[in-house]
Image (tube, rainbow, N blue to C red):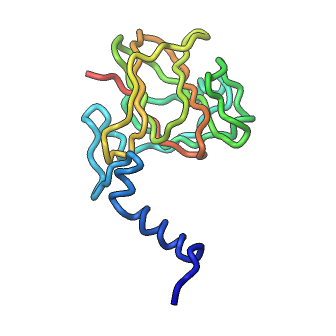
Amino acid sequence: MRQPLFLLFPALCTALVSTSAFAQMSGMPACAAPADPPAEMASWRAPQPMQAAADAKGAGKVKLKAGQAVALTLLPTPRISYPLRPAKPGGSVSFGGIVHFTVDQPGTWRVALSSGAWVDVVKDGTAATSIAHGHGPDCTGIRKMVDYSLEPGDYILQLAANGDPQMTVLVTRLP
């Protein structure tokens, strides 16, 4: 008996999503198992829970430790007062947040995210210019990496335009 196409479509989509061919077509790697991140990002596999702040004053109490990944709980965008307006702030149904981190040594510092959210590193009201960006290593769960050349001091990490209220975040100095 012939089935109407609209009845077969859900089954066909399920089959496509579960194949490595779909993963390759969508640009995602087909992963048999999670891969280990690079050594400087080893804490990615054991993130500590953290709640993002809604403003710069609150970010002073939310201190991200360099080299330690966090499972960050974000806030609805309308509740956030960013110190510097993000270039892509997201809409009323997106999520974001603010955290503080300290750079103790000059060098190249990487911000790694489990999503494609917008990220700004802010010091004294000015956003740092990124020097590199790209995707994380295949099968690690790191979706986005942005590198900055930073001097010692205190910084604000602004996250914006995320589709989910949770994300993993890591700030680390590169060797």
Above-or-below relation of 37 to 149: below
Of residues 137 and 26, the one drawn nearer to the viewer in this rendering: 26
Residue visible at 55% across and 30% down in the picture: 118
Q: Residue furthest bottom?
A: 1
Of residues 166 and 134, the one drawn nearer to the viewer in this rendering: 134
Q: Residue furthest front?
A: 2
Q: Quadrant of residue 48?
A: top left
Residue visible at 39% across and 64% down in the picture: 18
Residue 123: horizontal and vertical position, in percent?
Answer: 54, 12
Q: Is residue 38 left or right of residue 82?
A: left
Residue visible at 58% across and 9% down in the picture: 124
Residue 89: horizontal and vertical position, in percent?
Answer: 65, 29
Q: Quadrant of residue 105?
A: top left
Q: Is residue 128 left or right of residue 151?
A: right
Q: Is residue 7 left or right of residue 68?
A: right
Q: Is residue 157 left or right of residue 37?
A: right
Residue 4: horizontal and vertical position, in percent?
Answer: 58, 79
Above-or-below relation of 21 to 70: below
Residue 145: horizontal and vertical position, in percent?
Answer: 40, 30
